[in-house]
Every structure is written in C-alpha cells, then in structure tokens.
Amino acid sequence: MLNNTESTTQHDYLESYFMWKQYVKGNPGLFAGFQYPLTYGKWANLLRSRGHDICPICKSAGSYVFTFSGVDHEYKCICNVASWTYQQEQMTAKWKNAFEPTTWDKISTTTAFMQTGTQSADGPKIVAETKKTMESLQKFCTGTMRWHLLRGTFGCGKSTMLKMVGTELFPIATYVTAGNLKNFFREESANGDITELIEMFSKVRILLIDDLGMEYDGSGFTSKTLRNIIDNRMSFPGKFPTIATTNLSLAESDLMNGKNPDDLRAIISRFLDASYSDVHLLTQQDARRISYMNTKNDENGGVQ
Ligand SMILES: [Zn+2]
C-alpha cells in the first residue's frame, strides 16, 4: 500500500518554475501586479511590499503541494524557485552573452522575411513556417521542454526568435553565440582547465546557442568541447532543453571543406532526433541542406 510520500509526484525546479508561471497569471491575490520573469529580487520586493517576513505560501517549508484530479503534486515553492533563478544567474554570469531584450511582436515588423519573403513564390510558405516556429517557441516558454533547431539564412528571424525566448525566460535561459563560445573555450583552456566550463554549459537548465557552425577555431577544439556538452545535455533532453540556430549554407561549405566535420555533424544530428527535438526551416533555399545532413547521418549508420 502506498503512503502519502510515495503517491505524491515530485517536480524539480524547472517544472516548478513553469507551474508557478501559470499559477501567477491566473491567481491575482498575493500575486496581483506581479509578472514573470521571476527573479529573486522581484520576489523579495513583493513579500516586502505585502509586509511578509517569510513566504506566506509555504511558511519556509520550501515546497508546496498542488492537487490535480485527486493526485498530489509536490512542487518547489515559488520562494524556493526564486532563489534557484538567482543561482542559475550566478552560475552563468561569467559566460553568457548580454543581448537586447526582445519581445514577441518584433518579428512581424523588422525581419527581412516579411519584406522579401512575402514577395517571392515561397513567401506564404516561409511566413507560415515562421509563425509555426514562433508558436512552438512560445509553447516552449510555457514549459513544453523540447529541443529546437532553427535553420535559415541571414535575416530570416532565427536569432531574433532565440532572443525572444531568452528574454521571456530570463534569467534561467542562457544565451550565447557560437562565436563567443569559441572565445570562452580558448580563454579557459589557456588557463589550463575547461572542466568548470563544460560542467556549467552541461548543467544550465536552458541553453540557447546562436549561430551554430561559427565555433570553428582552426583546431576543432571548440566543436569537440561543444559536442561533449551537447551529449551531456542529450542524456536527459527534457531536463536540459537546448535551442540552437544555424546558417545552413555556411555550415554546408564548412563541412564540405573538411572543417571539423565529425563534431559539427554530430552536434547537428542531436537536434535531428524527432523524439525530443523539432527542426524549423525558415528559408526555402536550405531544403537541400536538410537532405544532405540526413544523408550523412544515414552513411554514419544513423543517429538515434
Ligand atoms: Zn514558499
């Protein structure tokens, strides 16, 4: 017979973050005027402004039980999640890239696809795919933790969309460009030890990598290290969701010229596994590239 503890489903910090995100939206009360993104500072200010010395929800217990259809679900309390967001922020402070906060309405007014895409024969298809991509990324921001690969050429809006996710999920999502990864890896290896860096990028809960393929450093060191990180994350894809963008035509020529082909191909292939990842093709001219990558995977015996 099950006792109370065993029949309670326990949820981790990331799941709790999204649970409270939804709860805060639908339950004013204590949360009136409070909006995600959740940070420790905002939470502390809310409590102070309402005259609470300790968390009024869990009374400092740290967890809170929601009951759905008669089943108990134990989540980390929002006070605990707020502290966790601070830890995530501190952990990544040294390596992430700053970027201009970007809201979801930006894509329709500023991206090149709206100006040029709509005028070409492929226009309606491109616009439809862009909308579909935005919708799935918005779903990601409510806690649907799949991986995503956004493929397309300059101006298709892929980096903008990545920054939209980074803005909405600040500070728990870590945004970094592949070009900057190269610099971080080089600096750390010059200091003699990249263990900490590999561990951080493997453990940060949501990783956003912009411009995959630009990490080539002459020796292939960055690609090899990044492959190691991606493989660590892939061991638990739902726990460590990862979104990347790539300019495929560039990547193709790099692969063809023999630049770190195995590692980059392996990294990309992790995003082609439909069981946990979605691929979005934002410009039509890249269609041949997808088939090239798939062919390569088949030649390598396929990647599960
Ligand atoms: Zn609490």
Image (cartoon, helix red, strand yellow):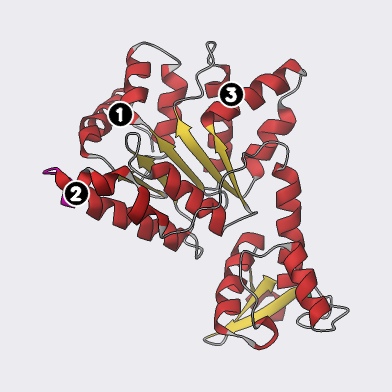
Q: Could you say which quadrant of the image residue 304 lies in?
A: top left
For residue 118, the mark is 2
Question: Is 198 one of the magenta-colored residues?
Answer: no
Residue 264 spot, x, y in % from top left: 44, 25
Q: Is mark 2 on a helix, strand or loop?
A: helix
Q: Which amino acid does label 3 sit on?
A: Lys
Pointer 1 residue: 293
Q: Could you say which quadrant of the image residue 109 lies in?
A: bottom left
Sequence-first tag of 3 and 1: 3
Residue found 72% across the figure and 42% down from its top:
93
- In the rendered view, does 16 fall on the left or right side of 270? right
- In the rendered view, does 123 fall on the left or right side of 195? left
Q: How many labels does the image show?
A: 3
Q: Does the residue labelled 1 lie within 8 Å of ligand 1?
A: no
* Mark 3 Cα shell of 10 Å, populated few (<14), some (14-19), many (≥20): many
Pointer 3 residue: 182
As rendered, which of 141 and 275 lies closer to the eye? 141
List the single residue furthest toward the right.
Answer: 53
Q: What residue type is labelled 2?
A: Thr
Q: Is mark 1 on a helix, strand or loop?
A: helix
Sequence-first tag of 2 and 1: 2
